[in-house]
Amino acid sequence: MDLNQQQGYTQPQQNCARCPIALLPLKSATQQVFNLYSTARLIHVFFLLCILLSCARKQQNDQQVFYYNETTGVATLDPAFARNQSIMWVTHQLYNTIVEMDADLNIAPSLAKTWEISADRLIYTFHLRKDVYFNDDNVFEGGKGRLLTANDVVYSLQRIVDTKTASSGAWIFNNRVDAVNGFTAINDSTFQLTLLRPFQPILGILTMQYCSVVAREAVEKYGNDFRSHPCGSGPFRLKYWDEGQAMVLEKNKQYWEKDETGKQLPYLDAVKISFYDNKATEFLEFRQKRLSFINDIDPSFKDEVLTKKGTLRNEWKDKILLDKHAYLNTEYFGILVDTQNALVKNSPLKTKAVRQAINYCINRQQLMMYMRNSIGTAATAGIVPKGLPSNNTATITGYQYDPARAAQLLRQAGIDRKNAPVIKLLTIPVYADIASFVAKQAADIGLVIQVEVIQKSLLLQQTAKEQAPFFRASWIADYPDAENYMTMFYSKNPAPPNYTRYNNPFFDALYEEALQETNDSLRYALYRKMDQLVIDDAPVVPLFYDEVIHLVNKEVVGFPANALNLLELRRTQVKKQ
């Protein structure tokens, strides 16, 4: 058949029995030809769209996206209010601090390349990088991000201590830095910090997300809405935020940092955050590979994933990775010891022997195995956790499991099974099983502990107001120095951080001496003396030193856990399997 016949342009006298169109009148044949031609065009367009969609999918699949869930939501993206983990995790992606912590908790350069400390340990001079720019934003001329300078550092840190800001981080500089003259820009690339008195952990404090450097123009333009209009210099920038539903961070293509081979960081193209408030839903999403990792593991499904020794069960080993790391967090029960408080005056807990008996009656090794699936380490030494350089469990005499000694101490306090008073222990739902475990072991020595489960917000309120004589608590390090733990027991501190209202003049003297000590070895020795005093007086019942636990999708690489449990994504990659 020639070309004309194929397209239907046949002469009537040349009808062909094999061509159905040729058997029709000319008008009908023309209409059929038009329909066939239109169909062909539609098919062509359809295949073209398929190709385009396929290319789009391939491009999307080639993108590296990290997914995680935040059960508590994110209240703000303003680092001046980075008071909890959910906010710290996100602001760490959006902003930089002048120095940061490396994987071994050593101070490392960030915005500052180098720094010097004066001989009297009062003046810290930082030399900033000259290649760091804020993200593009309409607050800047032409919408292009400008160079970050020492004036931005001054503004950001002064903003924390400014009472108008009402930052939850104002305490980090209180009585340490002069709010007016303590922050100085010598020139565009030189920032100077002046302390009121030597304070060795100050560099650690400067790594906190509170100290992130922000753009003044953005804060002033957006006002209260700055919480949802971040403008930083970090590895990612905000793309989208539907509060309570989802948040998307996209790669900052102008980010200044490179890896060891000269490749620009971050490797990821985006970070997607969901906000399922139910841990079971979060776990289901992870099982279906819709999340890159989950942080910690809920008690309701820990036995499904982990053995009692803290390893992955066989059925999970080919599916996910388990990453555990020492965490600067001590879990404990606190005991109010202020004898001027009416709740304490008539409480058996006012007696040191009773507090020590509770410490001795707990089999912490069993607690870790059966209640925690061996996540963490039994706290049989002091309050300072593993992972800090000053921690030396061999030098602190803590409480080993000794029910006979516990019963003896109760008898010394005049308590036996017949007259044992009821002691109320306040805890939150997620720790109810641990509290019940301790109550059962206390009952074995004749002590009656009644567990009362309340919401976390109410527990925080009652402990802050000294209305909780016996309560569940934890202390996560704000910065990696044991001073952060000792501050919980300094009598001049209110609640928080001194929730127990501990008051020991010998402890206070050691604490004040440690603040002035610039020699690390001598300072660590002072910390250990303080730790031993606290353990002997027993205003706390240390339970365990925590561990970071990550369940990680096998497609994720370069995602190490760290002792501060900070979400570090600059060198993370997602490699499709």
Image (spheres, rainbow, N blue to C red):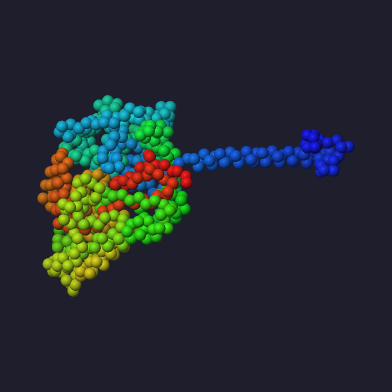
Q: Is residue 239 above or below residue 372?
A: above
Report the label total. 0
Instruction: State the residue in front, 20 or 244.
Output: 20
The x, y position of residue 274, in whole percent, is 43, 48
Q: Is residue 44 left or right of residue 304?
A: right
Q: Quadrant of the N terminus?
A: top right
Q: Residue at x 33, y 45 (%)?
A: 566
Residue drawn where x is 15% and y is 33% of the image: 120
67 lies above or below 5: below
Residue 272: image x %, image y %? 44, 44
Q: Quadrant of residue 257?
A: top left
Please give the name of the residue rendered at 27% of the width and 25% of the height, measured from the top-left corner: 187
Residue furthest out toward the right? 13
Answer yes or no: is residue 145 visible: yes
Q: For this view, does 553 lie left or right of residue 564? A: right
In the rendered image, which quarter is residue 227 located in? top left
**Percent of width and height locating residue 127:** 27, 29
Q: Is residue 375 above or below residue 252?
A: below
